Image: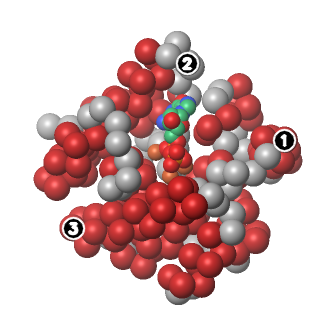
């Protein structure tokens, strides 16, 4: 699917703010794909659709997670996590995206997971550092992203875990597993 068609499909699902974020993720993901040798068209498509389900009602997302036998423990953690796997499901069903690498990059863009593919890492990181993002530590991750994908990912997942812990919020185990996997592989 070409960029213009994909953007048209996504735009009506999102607020203007979230659409601008999506354009930022798209540009950042393409740059990272070029820098780290990933498929730029897949990065573009996954980025455009990554937040497709962001504004679906919680009830609808909960029912999809239950009926599609997604990991049921998602329901015991922050509902912010749900739009990623639900998005992968709906993008296939409603937009006809069938590329499993693209769908997995959408599916794991919030929680992360151990053993992430290059494309999954790029979408996860692009979501975190796109130009519209402003939060403490993001500039440090932007700098790291120029030299090492894994170093930048480690920093971003550390920041997210710290952020959740400071707010006394639970952390989804897959997020810890992503962190452990990357930190153990680091030399
Ligand atoms: O959808 P976006 O806002 O663009 O970004 P996202 O899909 O990465 O969602 C990030 C939010 O999810 C962030 O504010 C933290 C929240 N969150 C809640 N529980 C968890 C979590 N993020 C991770 N990685 N792990 C959690 O357990
Ligand atoms: Fe998201
Ligand atoms: Fe993210
Ligand atoms: Fe996002």
Tag 1 secondary structure: helix
Kindly check if marks 1 and 2 are in contact, taking CB atoms under 8 A apart as contact. no
Q: Is residue 178 left or right of residue 35?
A: right
Q: Earlier in the sequence, mark 3 or mark 1?
A: 3
Please give the name of the residue rendered at 69% of the width and 30% of the height, measured from the top-left corner.
73
Please give the name of the residue rendered at 78% of the width and 41% of the height, measured from the top-left corner.
58
Foreground of the two, 117 or 141:
141
Residue 169 image label:
2
Residue 59 image label:
1
Residue 182 image label:
none
Quarter of the image for residue 137 reads top left
Residue 154 seen by the camera: no
Badge 2 residue CB within 8 Å of ligand 1: yes
**Percent x, y for residue 125?**
36, 51
Q: Earlier in the sequence, mark 1 or mark 2?
A: 1
Whether residue 152 is situated above or below residue 170 in the rendered picture: below
In the image as oriented, which residue stretches furthest toward the front? 16
Please give the name of the residue rendered at 37% of the width and 47% of the height, measured from the top-left corner.
133
Residue 35 image label:
3
């Amino acid at each position: 699917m070409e960029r213009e068609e994909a953007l048209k499909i996504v735009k009506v699902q999102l607020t203007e703010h979230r659409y601008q974020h999506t354009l930022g993720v798209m540009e950042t993901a393409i740059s990272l794909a070029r820098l780290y040798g990933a498929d730029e068209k897949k990065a573009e498509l996954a980025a455009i659709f990554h937040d497709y389900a962001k504004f679906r009602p919680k009830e609808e997302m909960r029912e999809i997670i239950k009926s599609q036998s997604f990991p049921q423990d998602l329901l015991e953690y922050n509902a912010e996590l749900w739009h990623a796997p639900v998005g992968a499901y709906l993008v296939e069903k409603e937009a006809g995206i069938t590329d499993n690498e693209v769908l997995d990059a959408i599916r794991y863009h919030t929680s992360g997971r151990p053993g992430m593919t290059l494309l999954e890492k790029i979408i996860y990181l692009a979501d975190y550092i796109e130009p519209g993002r402003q939060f403490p530590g993001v500039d440090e991750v932007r700098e790291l992203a120029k030299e090492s994908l894994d170093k930048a990912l480690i920093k971003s997942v550390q920041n997210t875990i710290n952020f959740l812990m400071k707010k006394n919020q639970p952390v989804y185990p897959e997020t810890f597993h992503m962190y452990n996997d990357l930190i153990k592989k680091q030399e």
